[in-house]
Amino acid sequence: MTATPHQPSPPRPRPPQDDIDLMKYFYLFLGNWHWFLLALMLSVAAALFINKYSPRVHRVSASLLIETPSGSPVGPMFGGADLMAGYGFNTGRFNLQNQVLIMKSTSLISKTIRALDFSVTYYSDELFGPRESLNNVPFIVLPDYSRPQPLGVMFTLEIAGDGSMKLGSRNTGSGVRMYSYFSEEMSPGPAEIRTGRTVKFGEEIVSDHYAFAIVPRNADGANPPPPAPGRWFFSFSSYADQTDTWSKRLSLKSVENEASMVSLEILSECPEKAKMFLDKHIEMYLQRTLDKKNQVATNTISFIDRQLSTIADSLDITEGTLQDFRRNREVVDLSFQSQQLFAQAKELDNQKAAMKMQDDYFRYLLSYLAENRDAGDIVAPSVMGISDPLLNNLVLELNRMADQKIAMGGSGASRNPYLTTLESQIRNAKARLEENARNLLNNTNLAMRDLNNRLNSLMTEIRKLPQTERELLGIERKFKLNDNIYTYLLQRRAEAQITKASNTPDNEIIDNAIIREAVKPRPARNLGLAAIAGLVAPALVLVLMSVLNNRVESEEDIKAIADIPVAGHIIHSAMPYQTVVLNDPKSRIAETFRNLRTRLQFFTREIKSPVILITSSVPEEGKSFTSVNLASVYSLAGKKTVLIGFDLRRPKIFGDFNLKRDAGISTYLIGQNTLDEIIQDSEYRDLSVIVAGPVPPNPAELAGSAKTRELFDELRRRFDYIIIDSAPLGAVSDSYSLAQLADITVILVRHNKTVRHILENTIADAKANGIKNMSLLLNDISRSKGVYGYSGRYRYGYGNGYGYYSDNGNGTATKRLRQKVT
């Protein structure tokens, strides 16, 4: 029977396995321990390098207590309950959120930047490039603000050991822009700015595109010592860029949910500069609240002054008229009846004057709301003696919300989503205030009409008096009225001035800016992560390589491919020769072949003179090596064994025993030689060899011929074991014919080389061709891999009757006589 060459089948998916073989990965990791050690050393070295050379990022923090609004911003003149509480709002939380937004506003941060003058940024020269610095830079750059300065240029100042300084520059962006610190406008600059000149401290350094001077930092005396040699950098930046930078760096958060304390934090590589910014920013914020309170008091005083100027003129006129009347008419005082009428008229006039002041205030308020879309500095109603609590609170809340809108508007609407809500609340508050003011104005007008009626009735009684007393009463009445109003306004003005002088910020600094611990790098954390990475990274790589590896690595891989028994395992041989069992019978490899011989007895125990075919799925999987040493272990056991080189396409084994190759299987099958002529002595007891002979043109036909069967029948009569070294079963069809004649077919699987799907296809095709009694042999297991316990060293002893070849260490072998064990 001649088998036809098979076509390779497509790769079949590997069957899923439910359980993870932990032992497999344990030996995988154990066999690659050196990679773990190398990765661990590299990762720890990287962590140490990062800990030493990476920039130190410090956390700079301060805390501020935000007071909830209570009472009026101008002190005792204002009163009333919190307006928003009356409308069901959480005023404390509302105010806290708004104050946080104000502190983050662009307008306030911009004022802080201008107060600090951060127009020049300094850098020190570090291993990985310039790093922002401040106090350790030994000089200060003083720009000439009357001239534009370049943005996008990094200047370099190198100080030599003799104190000389050289100024250099390089572009850091796509182009240079010229910036005016006065107008805050930018204009196109040159394509690049390059300079290289020697400079001195205090010298005015001027060119067409920059102008500044460099002075020593913290210099004491007229002739300070030269700074230490080194290299530093500096660059100019616009107010807008600095504002944007610090706005991103600054973070604010509430210390606790129920508290009104705010923590301000900045993470910075230059903590000294961040501390300066936080301290100044809090100072500007507190000054802003104080300025706002003073502005309200100032507006109140201005309003009263306008009223006083009007009343003062009337008071002077009435005072002069009264004096002239008394002098000309020689009237000193009124009669008793006139005094009573005067007292009644005075009381009614005072009431009318108070209502007139209220009427003026309501009209002022309505006019203000109509003319000013953004309120914020409305004079409080209590200034004019209006004690209506709702009106006071409406004015107070409208001033507060308008102030917050101005502050939050500086951040931009895109950054401040709450601004839209605040604008809606302002519109609603203005509508409520206008409605309330109109109602109060109407009520005041009604009250004034009632007073006028009462005054008209009183005037009827006054007209009955003598003409002189009647005229004097009218003059004194006007004078007293103006005098009382003037005195009242002076009192209110004094109260406003006292309030302005005693104003303090509503909020309180709890902790000034403090430079706290470095948040980057974290040495302990980095070392811990490095240790984990040094262990996990190689483990993941090895697991990934194992998962993606399409080659057979273990017996479990074989079992997952086919349900064919595994005859044994052969470890890797580093010897320069194939006859390992004969040359070194006490070696570990020899012991694995003895184990294989024992395992094969279970397959051949009832067969006399069994024929064992050694094949594989593809070439280079160790067929000849296995055949030679399997035949050797049988001969060592005293069994007459013949080794047949039936790989007619690629003959090999003749060289392992220094045999002639001119006569062999090919010449026997064509009738050129007899069996006795092709059987050669191996020079080892009980071991004969039949080589393949010359390569024939038709190896498949010869292997499938009837004479091949005759050959095996004759060999069974002469020998105890027949070992066949054949061609690859998965590559050519020769071995299919031989497998039909063999008692057991051993298919070699070379560790970490045999491809899974090729082996699976080979086994499937062998079964399809009717080949039975197959077994698999895992070959060439690397010692370093430690697969399933094969990394140990065998220490077995042997009887004195054995002789063997031993390696002398120089690649040569010494032949020793061996005797058959009895």
Image (cartoon, rainbow, N blue to C red):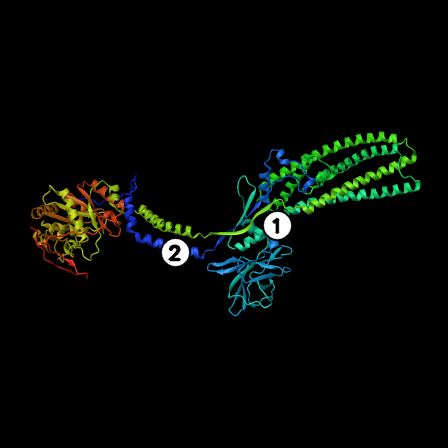
Tag count in the figure?
2
| Quadrant housing residue 473 | top right
Q: Position of residue 79 (x, y in %)?
A: 67, 38
Does dot 2 land on a helix, a strand or a loop?
Answer: helix
> For the point 92% across and 40% down, which residue is it?
330
616 sits left or right of 708 in the view: right
Q: Inspect the image, locate mark 2, and give the three-letter code of the amino acid beneath it.
A: Ala
Q: Quadrant of the N terminus?
A: top left
Does dot 1 land on a helix, a strand or a loop?
Answer: helix
Q: Position of residue 759 (x, y in %)?
A: 24, 45
Q: Position of residue 816 (x, y in %)?
A: 11, 58
Crowding at dot 1, Cα within 10 Å, few <14 / some 14-19 / many 20+, comes out as: some
Q: Position of residue 809 (x, y in %)?
A: 19, 61
Which mark is on residue 759? none
As displayed, is residue 363 above or below residue 270? above
Residue 373 appears in the figure? no
Q: Earlier in the sequence, mark 1 or mark 2?
A: 2
Residue 287 appears in the figure? yes
Q: Inspect the image, locate mark 1, and give the three-letter code of the amino acid beneath it.
A: Met
Residue corresponding to mark 2: 45
Residue corresponding to mark 1: 284
As displayed, is residue 818 above or below residue 251? below
Crowding at dot 2, Cα within 10 Å, few <14 / some 14-19 / many 20+, comes out as: some
Q: Nearer the viewer, residue 559 or 392?
A: 392
